[in-house]
Image (cartoon, helix red, strand yellow):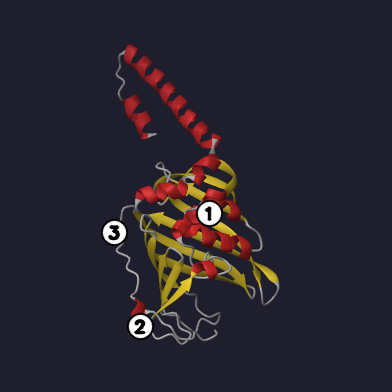
Amino acid sequence: MAKRQQRRAGGSVVVAAVLMVCACATSCAGSGAALDDARAADPVGTLRRAADTLVDAGSSKARTSMEMATGGTLVTIRGEGVYDYRERLGRLKVMLPQDPAGTSEHRPITELLAPGALFMKNRGAGVPADKWVRVDTATLTDGNLVTGGATDPLVAAEILRGTRTATYLGESELAGTEVRHYRGTADLVAAAKGAPSADKDVLAAAAKGFATAAVPFDVYLDDQGRIRKVRHRFSFVNGQRHGTVAVASTTLLYDFGTATDVRLPAARDIYAGRIAEE
């Protein structure tokens, strides 16, 4: 819009100039329509490339939220941190919700995200406060898309490699940035096949562990094709109640190119004892 205004402002009172501006405005409108047509023509292909675009971006800050209904109460777990897409390393501080009565506060859990692994500090359950717990994410029935309380931002993008259907819904604004909104459904089996080796096992585990491999999503891309917001809706089986639980996971990405400096814990700092049942 700003470019159109600048081009229109370039006109003068001279009739010939006015006519030129009108022609230019018509051309610009046509170009904008053509761009929208291109975006709408291949939304599936656009979304399948979203993970690669993040790797090209290098890094960003991230905010996460995970919502699920349990016992008739909507529970939300929030996280905030940074992610290095090239090194595939992230750090999040995850805030657990208060107990329903609001009387018990939980210390934030620091999570380090790495290929095939999740490290957690302040895990509780008998783990010393100065020790980390390491989890092999490929052994989790959900591939850690839900278990850690936050979906790994790069894995969230890798899910889009399995996009089966998608619709371009037009432009909107998100935190002051113009974004393009897409809605669709991804298949975790297809995502696992298309993902780099570091994420294949994680996505394959989720495809087997969830109630369905189909994952509905809404995603917002900026003009460079970078994900600014993605919301997945997962469905998994509750083993205790033999029912299906719906989880909505939202990831917001911003401040691309930010410094990250994520360092994984040394072996001596990883807890090797038994973790108590909670």
- Residue sitting nearer the eye, 130 or 97: 130
Q: Which amino acid does label 2 sit on?
A: Asp
Which quadrant, please, contains the N terminus?
Answer: top left
How many other residues sit within 10 Å of disc 3, few (<14), some (14-19) or many (≥20)? some
How many other residues sit within 10 Å of disc 2, few (<14), some (14-19) or many (≥20)? few
Which secondary structure lies at badge 2? loop
Which secondary structure lies at badge 1? helix
C-alpha span from label 3 to label 1 = 25 Å
Q: Which residue is drawn at 48% across and 75% down?
A: 96
Image location (x, y in percent) of residue 250: 50, 59
Which quadrant, please, contains the C terminus?
Answer: bottom right
Q: Which of marks 3 and 2 is nearer the N terminus?
A: 2
Q: Which amino acid does label 1 sit on?
A: Ile
- Residue sitting nearer the eye, 187 or 22: 187
- Residue of label 2: 130
C-alpha span from label 2 to label 1 = 34 Å
Tell me: residue 197, above or below residue 209: above
Q: Which mark is residue 102?
A: none
Residue 213 in the figure: left or right of residue 154 = right
Q: Earlier in the sequence, mark 2 or mark 1?
A: 2
- Residue sitting nearer the eye, 16 or 87: 87
Image location (x, y in percent) of residue 185: 60, 50
Tell me: residue 26, above or below residue 143: above
Where, by quadrant of the figure, is residue 271 drawn?
A: bottom left
Nearer the observer: mark 3 or 2; the answer is 2
**Looking at the image, which residue sits at the far top?**
16
- Asked if the residue under mark 1 is in contact with the one under mark 3, i.e. CB atoms within 8 Å, the reply is no
